Amino acid sequence: MKLLVCGGAGFIGSNFVRQRLREHGDEITVLDKLTYAGRRENLHDVLDEIRFVHGAIEDPAAVAHCATAAEAIVNFAAETHVDRSITGPEAFIVTNMQGTHVLLQTARDSGLRYVQVSTDEVYGSIESGSFTEASPLAPSSPYSATKTGADLLVSSYFHTYGLPTVICRGSNNYGPYQYPEKLIPLMVLNALAGDHLPVYGDGRQVRNWLFVEDFARGIGHALEHGQPGEVYNCGGPDECENIDVVRRIVELTGAEESQIEYVTDRPGHDRRYSLSCEKLGRLGWRACTSFDEGLERTVNWYRENIWWWEPIRTGEYLDYYKRHYGRALKG
Ligand SMILES: NC(=O)c1ccc[n+]([C@@H]2O[C@H](COP(=O)([O-])OP(=O)(O)OC[C@H]3O[C@@H](n4cnc5c(N)ncnc54)[C@H](O)[C@@H]3O)[C@@H](O)[C@H]2O)c1
């Protein structure tokens, strides 16, 4: 298939690109703005097998240029960190909403299929049970609100213009190439460096962890087998409290429990996310990687790929970290 993958230099996008090249032989153009979270290094082993364009999804000319010859657009491009959306929501509105609109309009003008990569956070928090695709949307943060707005725009393009769209809502992802501001890589790298492990609030927030290769395969599955106009949840096999995730990382890295430090909770922090994935299951997808297996693979990957993360733990990341946690990183 000929794909335009937007945000393909980020965490999930780069895993998707690698998987589609290896398992499907797709012809891929990546369009990416290369924000702090997007890096050519994420695509280091496949750069000469793809066409890479440095540009923004909110730029209609850049998108039109990349869309020629594509059959479908798969959109990963987004501002994705909830904490950053609380301190600076503007970029989230531009990329997540305005950018999605430019992509939809281009898909409509060029007759392309469209896949929107979305998140379980659009449903908000749930105390018990799991969200289905029919659950009401109740986002809590500027991040999830802009992702919800984007999903609604996508649905409107299906209903109003008949654009063949699919939305794929994933639960919390983890795995290789994830920027270390997110919980699992943050804890792994701090644990390996002997640094503190900052846990929000009481650490009892529950997340439905999904290994990134399983999500990438779910998105590919929705692209190939999804019904136009439909939404598909794509959740992980295991739920786990954040504090248990951190304790497992302490064990896997040989760090000390005393490195764990409880810090002020994120404002409006959702307590629990949980997805029912029967709909995508009926199309033949399931998450194959248990949290135990995926976490061990992830810790090993960060241990073995110092070249990838060492340059990140300087400059912008250190400034962000100090502003956010009120203290500097050790190493
Ligand atoms: N990480 C998760 O746990 C998770 C879970 C479910 C859904 N999602 C969704 O999956 C998608 C990818 O998430 P991720 O974790 O890989 O994010 P990421 O932050 O690692 O990567 C985002 C990518 O988008 C690019 N980008 C940002 N703004 C852009 C713009 N205006 N134009 C072009 N490119 C731009 C960045 O440079 C980066 O390469 C997002 O839409 C996110 O909402 C993420």
Image: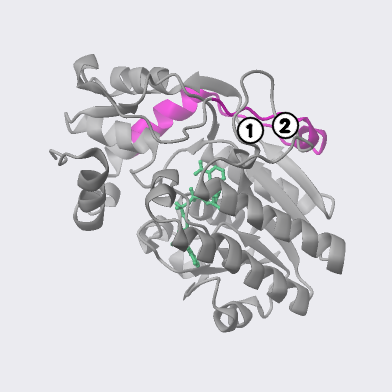
* Side of 80 where 287 appears, left or right: right
Q: Quadrant of residue 21?
A: bottom right
> Magenta stretch containing residue 94, yes or no?
no
Residue at 75% across / 53% down in the picture?
A: 166
Residue type of the residue flagged with mark 1 = Gly
Amino acid type at mark 2: Cys
C-alpha distance separating marks 2 and 1:
6 Å
Image quadrant in which the N terminus is located:
bottom right
Please provide the residue range marked out in magenta: 272-301
* Disc 1: residue Cβ within 8 A of ligand 1's nearest atom: no
Residue occupying image coordinates x 64% and y 31%: 287
Element at label 1: loop
Which numbered disc covers residue 235? Answer: 1
Of pointers 2 and 1, the one earlier in the residue sequence: 1
Q: Nearer the viewer, residue 145 or 147?
A: 145
279 part of magenta stretch: yes
